[in-house]
Amino acid sequence: MSEEFNFTIKDYESNFKPTWCPGCGNFSQWRAIRQALIELEIPPEEVVAVSGIGCSSHMPNFLKVYGLQTVHGRGIPVATGIRLANPKLTVLVYGGDGDIYGIGGNHFLHACRRNVDIITIVSNNFVYGLTTGQASATTPVGTITRTTPRGSIENPLNPIATAISAGATFVARAFSGDLKHLSYIIKEAIDHRGFAFVDVFSPCITFNRNQTFNYFRERVYKVDDTDHDKEDFYAALDLSNQKFIKDNLPIGIFYQIEHKTTYEERDFTLNQGVIPAHAPLDLSKEQIDIITKEFY
Amino acid sequence: MTKDIIIRFVGSAGDGLVSLGNLFSKILKKHNFNVLGFRSYQSVIRGGYNEYQIRASTDEVLSIGEEADIIVLLNKSVAAIHRVRVNKDAMVIYDNDYINLDELDYPEDIQKLPIPLANITKDISKLKVLKNIVGFGAISQILGLDETLIKEVIVEQFGHKGEEVVFTNFEALEKGDKFATENKWPIKWEKHKYEKAQQMIITGNEALALGMISAGLKFYSGYPMTPATSIVHYLTKHLPKLGMIVKQTEDEIAAIGMAIGAAYCGARAATGTSGGGFSLMSELVGMAGIEEIPLVVINSQRAGPSTGMATKTEQADLFQAYGISQGEFPKVILAPSSVIEAFNVGVDAVEIAEKYQVVVIVLLDLYLSEHIATVRKFDLERKNSRFAILDKPSEDYIRYKITKTGVSPRTLPGTKNGVFFTGSSERNESGTSIASTLAGLPETLPIREEMVKKRMRKLEYILEELEKPKIYGEKEASITLVSWGSTKYILREAIKLLKAEGIEANQLHIKAINPFHKTEVKEILSNAKEVLCVEQNFTGQMNDYIRMKTGFDIKHNLRRWDGEPIVPSQIIAKVKEVLNIE
């Protein structure tokens, strides 16, 4: 954190105006991310926003922070490399359900178990939007899409349960229709030490007529309003497995533990305080002796 | 007088062939021999048929050689298989309590040297591997090796295990020596005093890793795949002392993804794999290309396609490397030929990547990755400098400024005023995507044209920095041999042997595959009397590549694709065939 922090929300906004459909759930996330960075007093140059491909993955285009858009599904490994090379940076991964749960699913699992201190926010709209409406990993059974004209026959992935089981140390859900709560959750995620994951119910107003803003408004309730113990692994799993029934879509922090060491704390190079991105390039005589001894 | 010997250990996986071969290579190195060692093996953990062949010479060692002077059979099942590989005058060492050579129909002219290794070892220790040291003792008698030097190697190798282990090894060594003396084993070389060696003995993979480290490599990621895995093994050993991260990932896509992330942050980064993993990396290679992120990608080729023959060598990924990832972007492809060159290419690859913000692909092959060779001490004390990185950018900084060389100074995340966006889509100079709402607009068409040109012209400048190919040997030779990768010195041996027969051959070796020195290559080939292209693949990829780049059609070809390294006798026979010499 810098000493004199006087950035405004505009300072995190690029010249490129968002290209999302008017009314898209991504807008409030765009706002919430900037809001959270300001509240945490993280200047733009210390943030890297990484994404994949899809509507939501355009996010880094519209932020004035270091931004890197990768190819489809590969935001997490690239972000991990960034963080390991320079652990001073705040590294955000942003993408959609297709990008992170579908094509990038393998990386998502391993990021959870590694507990590298990065933040992954998934704009979950239950559909492939940019390719004009196909079923995704979170599309409920029976949903009619352009690739499932007779209704989807695959069971959807439960991202919250998956993340908890795989070892993520911060697992939360928010809703694009509640900006205040969304900003709070994203702020908590950024502030968390270790891998933080936020699944955001973010309606696609063009290709999804089922999971709409109204659909969620009628069903979401805040975990904070209950007596849920977010440090209780089994309670968190239980909560994540509640079925999609009326008035029963919990949002908030499902699971958070602070006692688990992060990857950075365990790594034998990083825990010496080294920043590989800026470490000296030349070898000392002593280093040369150590690394060549076995060849004599 | 030149001393030159080939020793072949034949055993199964689980016989400890690698450590045995490496140890004996070190012993020979200690005696100041030039040494080359290569294991031919199978993808099994226990059992099967493996060979470890070592060639040692007072002259330079160019190839692993063909006919072994000394063969050591480590078990009965391999002894039966090896029969057809035994040359007439070989000395064959074997444990006669377990192997009966008379039953196995070995050629009559061989020198049989039975020795009850297991029985001798039993008296010393329960450790079965000690029988190898007993064997070394016996062989050292044949070769007139210096006991003190062998013991030095044993201390270096086993010293950390304690005095008792060292002395047990000494005893095993002495017993082997004594057995050979008492049984009047043949003496090939008389004992004499050896000068102590200053050389290193190292594999191609390790040399490449050392080269990269000395050029300031700070991040390496990989997923296990033969024959690239030993790069990770070596780097991991020392990383905390180097301020370096070495990361095993969930797959090769993550491996290259992490390396790209680290490189974008400013860490000099590389990733390595073999063909299968290289295929998976393909998409992100192109991303690093368009985002202009410096990156080294190593592909140690093995026999394909698909899983192919995982433990066998081949040079069949040339076009995979050249065509990797969709679209057009500058990719540098370098193929080192030897352990020494692997080190040099390691340095160059890391430097070129950062200097030009490009992907540098290093094409190795299994034979180069895995064989060990003695080399003079590498110069690791380099003074590295950073290229095209701005610490204090001006307020109006833009990331992808069009420049003469195509290289735009970059900022690293964390730098004030340096914030920029990069993506896998086409962009303008400031980094903004021109692929969505700006795509196809009249004003963006010239931007696309210029951005492609900017990236591609880096290759012109890189070409100027690369060493030009030149002819090795007599200019007026009857035939020019063309090679790439690890076959370079095998050809050199053939050239040497041909010269001894009065046949002049020279060599054009290609190291820089892209960018390509087409003018020089075309000129050399046009002046050649006959041209023979030698490569380890079926289709003749280098031959096709040269024709594509220069229009020159090489008429004669020698190709091998059975998985084993090409040998000088094959080349000699082919040269004679081309030249119509009986």
Image: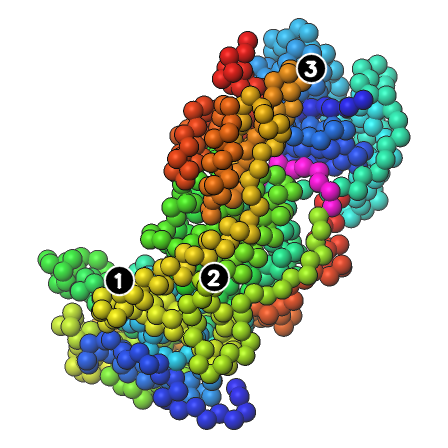
Identify which amino acid the numbered label 2 is placed on.
Thr
Circles 2 and 3 on the same subunit: yes
Secondary structure category for the residue under label 3: loop
User: Does residue B310 appear in the picture of this structure?
Assistant: no
| Residue underneath mark 1 | A137
Crowdedness of circle 1 by 10 Å Cα count: few (<14), some, many (20+)?
A: many
Mark 2 or mark 3: which is in front? 2
**In the displayed structure image, the side of residue B156 where residue B259 appears, left or right:** left
Q: CA distance from mark 2 to mark 1?
A: 45 Å
Circles 2 and 1 on the same subunit: no
Mark 3 or mark 1: which is in front? 3
| Residue underneath mark 2 | B405
Magenta stretch encompasses residue B254 = no
Magenta-drawn segment:
B367-377
Q: CA distance from mark 3 to mark 1?
A: 65 Å
**In the displayed structure image, the side of residue A179 where residue B317 appears, left or right:** right
Crowdedness of circle 2 by 10 Å Cα count: few (<14), some, many (20+)?
A: some
- Residue extending furthest left? A150
Find residue B90 and name its label.
3
Find residue A119 and name its label.
none
Crowdedness of circle 3 by 10 Å Cα count: few (<14), some, many (20+)?
A: some
Q: Is residue A195 above or below residue B343?
A: below
Seen at 67% across and 37% down, the residue is B373
The quarter of the rendered structure image containing the C terminus of chain B is top right
Identify which amino acid the numbered label 1 is placed on.
Ala
- Residue extending furthest right? B193
Mark 2 or mark 1: which is in front? 2
Q: CA distance from mark 2 to mark 3?
A: 60 Å
